[in-house]
Amino acid sequence: MKRSYTFVTAREVVRCDIDGVSIALPVFVGVLKHPTERQLYELLTRPEVARKYTYEALRKLPWPALRQFPHHWLRSCLPASSLPAPRRRAVEFMLSP
């Protein structure tokens, strides 16, 4: 019997202008609880939603999914994400050059 595994992949990439910089955010349905996939594409163009989405992604998503985010963006969101200390250390280690 053959097993097939599904790996975490982004549905699409949405660009959001935050502080004059265009950030490419991968779209993972389920990071934010209520929006549908179509609504998420629209919502992620707003900077405040993009930040909240990234904070939740840092809390919930496994490293293969987080790896698809721009690393400089994850580093800038890490201090305000209020992650538990073990998770924060693991993410910081993975983001280290």
Image (cartoon, grey):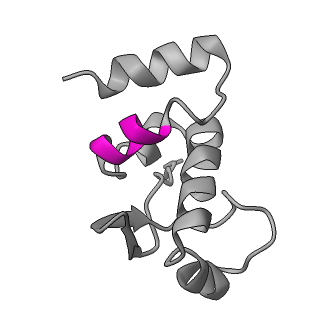
Q: Residue furthest front?
A: 19
User: Is 9 placed above or below 1 here?
Assistant: below
Indicate the position of residue 34 as horizontal and vertical percent values. Answer: 81, 71
Magenta-highlighted residues: 72-77
Q: Quadrant of the C terminus?
A: top left
Which image quadrant is residue 92 in?
top left
User: Is 20 placed above or below 39 here?
Assistant: above
Q: Is residue 26 left or right of residue 3?
A: left
User: Is 84 placed above or below 41 here?
Assistant: above
| Residue under the point 40% across and 73% down | 16
> As rendered, which of 64 and 44 lies closer to the eye?
44
Q: Is residue 97 left or right of residue 6?
A: left
| Residue under the point 66% across and 85% down | 39
Q: Residue furthest right?
A: 34
> As rendered, which of 53 and 62 lies closer to the eye?
53
Indicate the position of residue 48 as horizontal and vertical percent values. Answer: 59, 64
**Membership of 21 in magenta stretch:** no
| Residue under the point 38% across and 35% down | 75
Which image quadrant is residue 35 in?
bottom right
Q: Is residue 10 left or right of residue 34?
A: left
Indicate the position of residue 4 as horizontal and vertical percent values. Answer: 49, 52
> As rendered, which of 8 and 40 lies closer to the eye?
40
| Residue under the point 71% across and 61% down | 32
